[in-house]
Amino acid sequence: MRVLFVHQNFPGQFRHIAAHLAQQPGVEVLAIGRDTAPGLPGVRLLRYKPHRGADQATHPYVRTMEEAVLHGQQVLRLLLDLKGKGYRPDVIVAHPGWGETLYAKDAFPHAKLIHFCEYYYHSHGADANFDPEFPLDINGAARIRTRNALHLLNLENCDLAVTPTKWQHSLHPAAYRDKIQVIHEGIDTDNLKPDPNAELTLPNGNVLKAGMPIVTYVARNLEPYRGFHTFMRALPDLLKQHPTCQVVIVGGDGVSYGSAPKDAPNWRSKLLQENPVDLSRVHFLGKVPYDTYKKVLQVSAVHVYLTYPFVLSWSLLEAMATGCLIVGSDTAPVREVIRDGANGVLVGFFDKDEVVRAVVKGLGMGEEAGEYRRLAFSEARGYSMREGVVGYQGTIERQLVGVVAEVVG
């Protein structure tokens, strides 16, 4: 069986299934990614780079589509080169969000194409126009509607699609939902467990230990999409109401979603200026190695996770797998995994006072917090790497049966 993975940032969400298949006898794994993709040991990666970006003269509504065509064209060139050398994939597993597989079926019409459909955009009812501080104007809504043309093509072109959560599934057009399976790619739950003896050494040399009143917050980048503005606005009152707690914040100063502030270098500096806090108690670690990140979660007494109605972060599931007491936003993706009053506490995304009350209460729970932590840990086990690999492998093998049937027929 020949499986071709295509992902701009390979391995991305395909890390676990690609590594697993690469170790299976009789399976040949090949990958295509951008020139900036990190790659995966044991998997051959072919890199591409579009020969140019979208023209600035292109209409703003369709600039994303032009970028997608340029990505698809460059990947097509790679595919045709492989075809000329005799390569024929049985199954192509791809994240098509940047247009990479727009023309994959033109190169390999008999290969089964499985798309990872991460997100289908809406101008209302999801992330866009959710936050009143960042209203969506008519041009923004038009860009979203036009941008979905790519995702409709991706749904039409593939033989089958996969999306990680039920909520993400619900965002896609009803006409295509039967074509989309819900399979989460999985997190490494075997490597994420509570540790009552965990210690975290801060940059200033101080050591934080599990059992201390430590509040944690994690995001790839510190920005409003992940509720950083609400969290920062809650901090002054939190520090006042609980004078011994320490706060550990992990995340970069870049922009993953949304946009940078217009009047400051980044959201961290802007929100610190607006909400001064004692930096001997609030510790910004930036982006950290995985082992440090794991220790942050293991020493946490209360972990705060806030998000727009958007893609669910791995970090929430990883915090649950570490047995954290979760204070999460009462938004659709979080409600899928956190049950208020059972395995965590839900708060209003914009309600900084409610965040403070929930965190202070959580810090004082004592043994009562153990049941929340235990149930969160148990829920996270259902999102294990093993479950993700089983789901993906079963989907790929079922598509392979279809290839064999076509050949025989």
Image (cartoon, rainbow, N blue to C red):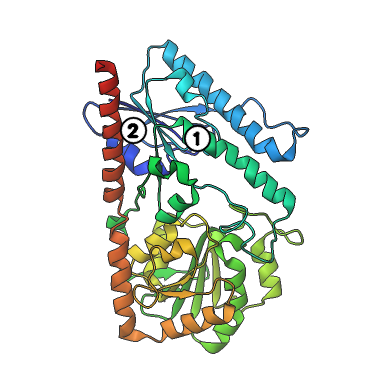
Residue displayed at 42% across by 19% down: 108
Asked where in the image residue 131 lies, by quadrant, the reply is: bottom right
Asked where in the image residue 350 lies, by quadrant, the reply is: bottom right
> For the residue marked with disc 2, what is the amino acid?
Gly
Q: Nearer the viewer, mark 1 or mark 2?
A: 1
Residue 317 percent location from the top left of the image: 38, 60
Task: Give whichever of 238, 355 is nearer the camera.
Answer: 355
- The N terminus sits in image quarter: top left
**Marks 1,2: beta carbons within 8 A:** no
- In the displayed structure, 134 sits above or below 3; it is below
Q: Which residue is mark 2?
A: 42
- In the displayed structure, 141 sits above or below 268; it is above
Residue at the outermost left position: 25
Residue 152 percent location from the top left of the image: 53, 37
Residue 66 percent location from the top left of the image: 65, 31
In the figure, is residue 216 to the left or right of 318?
A: right
In the figure, is residue 49 to the left or right of 37?
A: right
Asked where in the image residue 262 lies, by quadrant, the reply is: bottom right
Q: Which residue is mark 1?
A: 154
- In the displayed structure, 49 sits above or below 282; it is above
